[in-house]
Amino acid sequence: MRISSTLCVIFAILLASASAWAESWCASPIFVHEWGVHTFGQCSTELGEQAKCPIDTKLPSYFHREGPAVNDVSRHVKDEPVDTGEREIPVIQVYSKGGWSDRIPLAVELGFANGQAQVWYPQVDARLANDEPIELVWSQLSGSETPLKPAPDTELDWILGLRKVPDALWLNHKDETERFIFYEGDSQESAALRLRKGEQYSPEKRHLLIENTSDADVEDVFLSFRGDGHSFLFFAPKIPAKSSAGFILEEHELSNDDWAKSSRSQLRKRLLEPLALDAIDPWTNCIMGRDPAQPYSISSGYRLYSEELEVLLALWAERFFDSQGYTLLYRESTAYVDQQVPLRVYTDMYYYVVLSRLSLALMENVLISEQ
């Protein structure tokens, strides 16, 4: 059965600290971290029918739901000059966190292979036709250490939390400033997993199989069950495509007193970036000769810095682990995310992008199949 789903994504850009000066200049790294949750689920209505579970993530009223149909700017960051490796004017490093200027030019393009954007912020420069691989276009953004405009007033904890993430650049676009890009869209993708009874299943010994029915591997798979005063948590590091993981539910019981700490700490361990931003040597890779017309679109990782991860957990952990009944949580592979939600990040020749994308899939109110 195909279930409509919703993808909520937070897109933040961080700049590595760099105090060294290179005699032969090198492009500075920009670390782009994207994280989001792909939700699947069915909830009972008052009539006893099954309906899509509502998304309870609160969004501010100033987020955009309509945008221009065509690009209304004359210049795109990808039209910046190509780097030939020659510098007629010496470049002076003046940005205290590293880089070659106090404003970093950026452009972001994204779309949905099987869906459509519904909400975004800041406002886009163009919203392309549905038959295009790219739908939302921010053609001229600038990243800065301090906001160029006052950020909108909000009382939402998740937005306030993201604004406190250390070293995250403020992203400025026309009259709008925020410390992240937000987008949300509907998707017609099917969930990768299903839960069914194993051959040894009995009410006292629940032998269960988590089957990956998709053509893509899934990783960091958590199955939680809470009910009748008991709590169970099963974890599989990976379930390859067209494969399954079997287990006896009763062998994975946790005490209710330890539930919150144990469930969240396991997920935190799987998603935390072990190398702090300040520990990164930005000159490890000397990249020159970049063409700004060539975007960065392939993910090289998925882990988050601790402050980002705590915002994610504060917003989603209760739905990940604390609901009654069966819940499945897994991480979609970065290759799958790049295919389903194509993302292109552009910058000028003075910078290069390291792209990290984390997409967690949440299946709520999971029913057990007999076969």
Image (cartoon, helix red, strand yellow):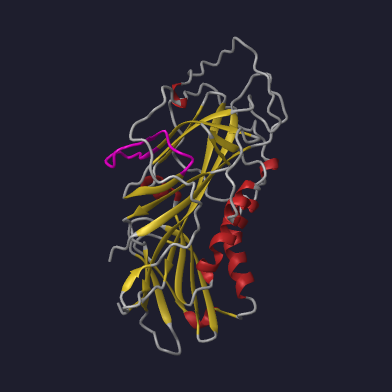
In the image, the segment drawn in magenta is 121-136
Q: Residue at x 33, y 60 (%)?
A: 4
Q: Is residue 109 left or right of residue 286?
A: left
Q: Nearer the viewer, residue 308 or 240?
A: 308
What is the tally of numbered marks visible in this picture? 0
Residue lying furthest bottom in this view?
204
Name the dominant secondary structure of the magenta segment.
loop
Tell me, yes or no, whether the highlighted magenta stretch contains residue 258. no
Q: Is residue 113 left or right of residue 325?
A: left
Q: Is residue 238 left or right of residue 179?
A: left
Q: Residue at x 48, y 53 (%)?
A: 36
Q: Nearer the viewer, residue 101 or 152?
A: 152
In percent of width and height, residue 90 lies at 65, 13
Residue 96, picture quadrant: top right
Quadrant of the image for the N terminus? bottom left
Q: Residue at x 71, y 24 (%)?
A: 21
| In this view, 97 is above or below 80 | below
In percent of width and height, residue 73 lies at 42, 25
Q: Residue at x 73, y 30 (%)?
A: 19
Q: Is residue 201 left or right of residue 130?
A: right
In percent of width and height, residue 115 lies at 33, 50
In percent of width and height, residue 252 lies at 54, 78
| In this view, 236 is above or below 367 | above
Q: Nearer the viewer, residue 42 or 295?
A: 42
Tell me, yes or no, whether the highlighted magenta stretch contains residue 132. yes
Quadrant of the image for the C terminus? bottom left
